[in-house]
Image: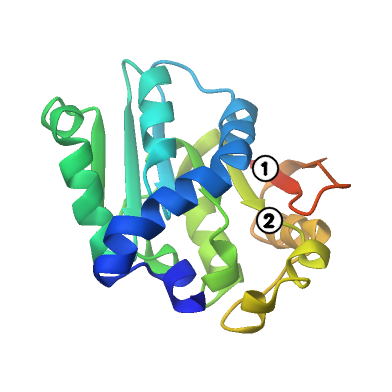
Amino acid sequence: MAAQFRKPSGWFGSLFFGRFMNRVNRKIIDSTIALLELSPQHHVLEIGFGGGVSLSSVAETVSRGMVTGIDVSPEMVRQAERRFQRQIAEGRIQVQLGNVSQLPFPEATFDRVFTVNTIYFWPDARQGIAEIHRVLKNGGRAAISIRSGDKMKKYAVTKYDFRLFSPDEVADLMRQAGFRDIRVDHRDREHWYDQVVVLGTR
């Protein structure tokens, strides 16, 4: 199960896990997108789009821009290519395999970059955040969304292949990468699953 969280694969990942992630993450995805303050002309990157619900939501807002998604799972990329066939043909959505440690884009490509519940699996969080900073335009905004480590450590699955973070740890990593105006939006602290969105400006 931990391996499926990191990189959905096989029939289980293709048929079940994408829909499962869409449902479980919907609330934090919606909060993240709202805090990005998107404009119709923005070019937006999502790192680790999983089931693809966030690509759909962003594409509705960036009507004159584009949303690009990368994911380490070939199954999730193939699923998104089928689901968004029309939007891809129209040039409104682009999906591809990719890894946060070496984003396949030039410097200053995107107005917004976000990722939801993926940092736990990055091989090097410091490098990944530096890459996000690199591909953002000056004045662009990034959001890294997580469940706090205090909440996540209560679940047995997180003992395997997860690296947990506190909100302050993510904020510090963003600060070290050169982000400014960093703020932490922490909601649902009293619930089993909280919502943490750490925002920074390039």
Image point (45%, 77%), residue name: 3
- In the image: residue 154, left or right of residue 67: right
Mark pair 1, 2: CA separation: 7 Å
Report the residue marked by disc 1: 200
Determine the image quadrant of residue 165.
bottom right
Mark 2 Cα shell of 10 Å, populated few (<14), some (14-19), many (≥20): many
Of callouts 1 and 2, the N-terminal one = 2
* Residue 173 % position (x, y): 70, 62
Q: Amino acid at mark 1?
A: Gly
Q: Report if the CB atoms under discs 1 and 2 are less than 8 Å apart.
A: yes
Image point (52%, 50%), residue name: 115
Q: Would residue 61 be visible to someone looking at this image?
A: yes
* Residue 5 % position (x, y): 48, 68
Q: Residue furthest right?
A: 190
Mark 1 Cα shell of 10 Å, populated few (<14), some (14-19), many (≥20): many
- In the image: residue 64, left or right of residue 1: left
Vertically, is 44 above or below 194?
above
Vertically, is 174 above or below 64?
below
Q: Amino acid at mark 2?
A: Met
* Residue 13 % position (x, y): 33, 64
Q: Which mark is residue 174?
A: 2
